[in-house]
Amino acid sequence: MKLRKCNQLDLIELIEIGRSTYYETFHTMNSNETMSKYLDEAFHPTKINEELHNPDSSFYFLYSKEILSGYIKINFSPSQTDINDRNSLELERIYVKKEHIGKGFGKFLINKTISIAKNHKLKYVWLGVWEENKPALAFYRKMGFEFYKKHTFRMGDELQNDFILRRNI
């Protein structure tokens, strides 16, 4: 497995993997209308392009045997979605293609995120996870993340509760 930092040339592929992995993860737990609206907003080319140009955010592609298998998005303060602590790194997105779930890809991505945080001398990594996403909650707890607080997440026209989890470094 290897990570590669995304750049402007990755825009279309980033949108495609973002949409597909998000859909794979959440389509059975949300209405088609909610999913469609969210995917159109969150992965709009203009929005992703702006995120790629943000110096406080980075996307990384995960490859296994030269095949794109997942990705992460990390945010430094002040571009974080909630906490905005200069001593922290937000793992805003972590997605692995369905066929690779349970094969250590998520652990690899978490460990790489922690390594990035350590290299920047940060104190902790945090993320938001939907309270209904029980497999993800179990995985993050196994990886050493603990409940910190709740916040609201807009999914299309719906408001959902996310747990903010953090792991000290």
Image (cartoon, helix red, strand yellow):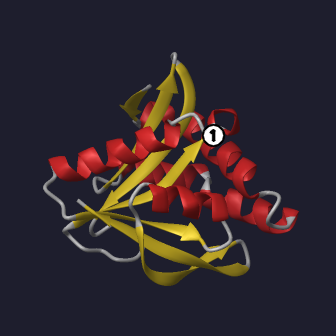
**At x 66% / y 79%, what residue is drawn?**
160
- For the view shown, which residue lies furthest in the front direction? 142
Q: Residues within 10 Å of mark 1 (few under 14, many from 20)?
A: few
Q: Secondary structure at mark 1?
A: loop
Q: Amino acid at mark 1?
A: Ile
Residue of label 1: 101
Q: Position of residue 23 (x, y in %)?
A: 73, 51
How far across and how far down the image is residue 142, in percent? 47, 56
Residue 38: x percent and y percent? 70, 64
**Where 34 falls versus 71 (above or below)?**
below
In the picture, the quarter occupied by the C terminus is bottom left
Q: Is residue 80 visible?
A: no
The relative height of residue 130 versus residue 27 in the rendered view (above or below) is: below
* Identity of the residue furthest to the top in this view: 65
Q: Is residue 125 above or below residue 25?
A: below
**In the displayed structure, does residue 113 sit left or right of residue 69?**
left
What percent of the width, then of the height, locates residue 120?
16, 52
